[in-house]
């Protein structure tokens, strides 16, 4: 997946947000992370 030792160290030390790690993992798999907020009234707001 092309992850450097330095990047692994950042992940282990908690220097990166979980969202960043998941987004990069998705990109490595050829995808992208998509997040949204779902409200009780049925509205949906995408988070860019």
Image: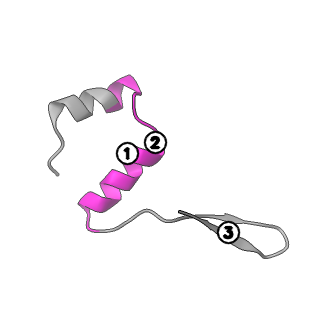
Residue 18's disc is 2
Dominant SS type (magenta): helix
Q: Position of residue 41 (x, y in %)?
A: 85, 73
Measuring 26% from the left and 26% from the top, which residue is drawn there? Answer: 9
Q: Is residue 38 magenta?
A: no
The local secondary structure at tag 1 comes to helix
As drawn, 20 above or below 4: below
Residue 25: x and y, percent?
31, 53
Distance, label 1 to label 3, CA atoms, is 22 Å
Q: Quadrant of residue 16?
A: top left
Single out the residue that lies furthest toward the front.
48
Number of marks present in the image shown: 3
Q: Which residue is mark 3?
A: 45
The x, y position of residue 17, in whole percent, is 46, 38
Q: Is residue 27 magenta?
A: yes
Q: Residues within 10 Å of mark 3 (few under 14, many from 20)?
A: few
- Disc 2 + disc 1, Cβ < 8 Å: yes
Q: Which residues are magenta?
A: 11-30
Residue at image location 30% in from the left, 60% down from the top: 27
Which quadrant holds residue 11? top left
Label 3 with label 2: CB-CB less than 8 Å = no
Question: Is disc 1 in contact with disc 3, using a CB cutoff of under 8 Å?
Answer: no
Q: Which residue is mark 1?
A: 21
The crowd level at tag 1 (other Cα within 10 Å; few <14, some 14-19, many 20+) is few
Residue 26, image quadrant: bottom left
For marks 2 and 1, give the CA distance. 5 Å
Q: Decide: is 11 above or below 27.
A: above
Q: Vertically, is 15 above or below 19?
A: above
Residue most extreme to the bottom: 42
Of 19 and 47, the residue lying toward us: 47
The CA span between labels 3 and 2 is 21 Å
């Amino acid at each position: 997946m092309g992850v450097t030792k330095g990047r692994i160290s950042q992940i282990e030390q908690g220097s990166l947000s979980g969202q960043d790690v998941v987004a990069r993992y998705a990109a490595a798999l050829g995808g992208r992370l998509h997040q949204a907020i779902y409200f009780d009234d049925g509205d949906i707001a995408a988070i860019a």
